[in-house]
Image: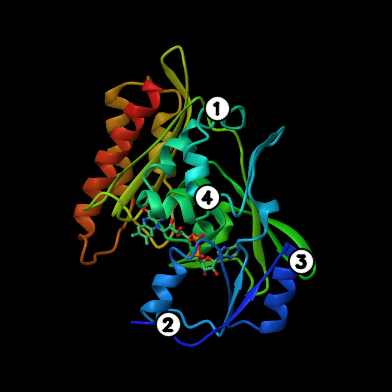
Amino acid sequence: MKPAPFTYHRAHDVRGAVESLHELGEDAKLIAGGQSLVAMMNFRLARPSALIDVNRIDALRYLRRDGEGLRIGALTTHHTVESSGSTAALAGFGVLSHAARWIGHYPIRTRGTIGGSIAHADSTAEWCLLAVLLDAQIVVRGQVGERSVAAADFFHGFLTTALEPEEMIVEILFPRPAPHAALSEFAQRKGDFAIVAAAVDLDVEDGVCSAGRIALGGVDAVPIRVPEAESLLQGAPATAETFRAAADAAAAAVEPGSDAHGDADYRRGLARTLIERACAQAIAV
Ligand SMILES: Cc1cc2nc3c(=O)[nH]c(=O)nc-3n(C[C@H](O)[C@H](O)[C@H](O)COP(=O)(O)OP(=O)(O)OC[C@H]3O[C@@H](n4cnc5c(N)ncnc54)[C@H](O)[C@@H]3O)c2cc1C
């Protein structure tokens, strides 16, 4: 299939992109890496009347550290994060560069952007899952200025977010993870979106978890934290038994749907296995 007709516009800065969104109306869409949008247009699942190409806005390609954490410009590609693991900007944020390796194939990672992924809001997308796990802030710009939305409030449902039609994501701010963090996932073929993905963030001192976070993708319309499992980590020894108990609690707490990739029980089983795996990987870091 080919896309429905659209007009093409190019923005050279954020102000121009936002103005174009305002002028062209709510059927206009930004195009970043095009790795999700073009496929949706080709299948006619998306029929934007106009595309605003933001790829020339180089000011939105950065990885920057400050007192609040790691700021990633919206047009930073998955591959840039993946290949920056050993840089000073990503010190302590290794979970991000490791997670980027799970995204699609190499050509997809060199074109696709973190802002596009967060805007697309697939529940198993690695950036969406890590944003929820780490309480990231999504910084968006519109006609009336900038606002920051907590990841927990940003994802509203299947491919649906808090983004207004005239707004553009400009930055994602990730607070520093706990010392032990990892993401694990299962897909039927390498490079596919995960069926289920699990991410954990563990604070371990003298063999005891002082705090732990667990987030799952693929068990709900949006990535979710699992407080029923997290409470079992707090104050518990960082052992395989503790991680299994937390994984069991998470599997019991979630209510996944069924689709062609697997039914609810299959997804619960994956969630259990992937949480245990992510915890084991996290404490090995
Ligand atoms: C075969 C295949 C496998 C893939 N596997 C994975 C995977 O395993 N994990 C994963 O996470 N992703 C995967 N993807 C998707 C890929 O990561 C995309 O790059 C990503 O979902 C969208 O980023 P993009 O820059 O390409 O956005 P685009 O496709 O250009 O845009 C996607 C949506 O976001 C909007 N948008 C883009 N940028 C902004 C912005 N700054 N502000 C507001 N709205 C914006 C667009 O209007 C559009 O609605 C896969 C894609 C393919 C084709």
- Quarter of the image where the C terminus is located: top left
Residue tagged by mark 3?
15
Measured along the vertical axis of the image, is residue 130 above or below residue 192? above
Instruction: Kindly report the distance in space between the C-alpha atoms of the residues bearing marks 2 and 3.
Output: 27 Å
Measured along the vertical axis of the image, is residue 135 above or below residue 9? above
Mark 4: give few (<14), some (14-19) or many (20+) Cα within 10 Å.
many
Q: Residue 92 carries which label?
A: 1
Amino acid beneath label 2: Pro
Specify whether 87 is left or right of 241: right
Q: Residue at x 36, y 52 (%)?
A: 104
- Of the numbered discs 2 and 3, the one sitting upstream in the chain is 2
Residue tagged by mark 2?
3
Q: Which mark is residue 77?
A: 4
Find out if the beta carbon at label 3 lies less than 8 Å from the nearest ligand 1 atom: no
Instruction: Kindly report the distance in space between the C-alpha atoms of the residues bearing marks 3 and 4.
Output: 21 Å
Find out if the beta carbon at label 1 lies less than 8 Å from the nearest ligand 1 atom: no
User: Can you give x and y, in whole percent of width and height, for residue 140 in the image?
Assistant: 68, 60
